[in-house]
Image (cartoon, rainbow, N blue to C red):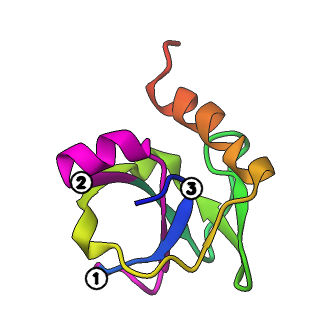
Amino acid sequence: MAQFHIYPNPGTKKVEIPYLVAVQNDHISNRTGATVVIPLRINAHPVEVLAPLVKVPGQGLFVLSADEIFAIDSVRLRQAVGMLSPADRAKIKPALDKVIGEY
């Protein structure tokens, strides 16, 4: 699994969450068999920093739902549809800092 690649959601919530973006370092994924992903939601309202808009190449804008981060068995992720741009990748760390940061 390549970090920042976008995969079709293999789960049951494909309508509202059509894609998952892999955020875990490749080195870790190759050792564990699991990949940490963040859902990309359609028809959701973006929230500054926590849930920004990101672009799926050829598909449009989706909300990066950082508060729904989870791990999935890597074999369930098939055929990446694209990769996040460097500008969209830069939105991930601040979003995760909002989820797990101290207040």
**Where does the image place residue 29, in percent across and percent down from the top left?**
31, 48
Residue at 53% across / 55% down in the picture? 65
10 Å neighbourhood of mark 3: few (<14), some, or many (≥20)? Answer: many
Is 49 left, or right, of 100 in this rendering? right
Q: Which residue is mark 2?
A: 34
Q: Which residue is mark 1?
A: 12
Question: In the rendered structure, does residue 90 fall within the stretch colored magenta?
Answer: no
Residue at 69% across / 39% down in the picture? 49
Nearest to viewer (mark 3 / mark 1): 3
**Quadrant into which the N terminus falls:** bottom left
Mark seen at residue 4: 3
Is 39 left, or right, of 94 in this rendering? left
Residue at 40% across / 52% down in the picture? 68
C-alpha gap between disc 3 and disc 1 = 22 Å
* Residue type (three-letter) at the residue carrying disc 3: Phe
**Where does the image place residue 63, in percent across and percent down from the top left?**
63, 62
10 Å neighbourhood of mark 1: few (<14), some, or many (≥20)? Answer: few
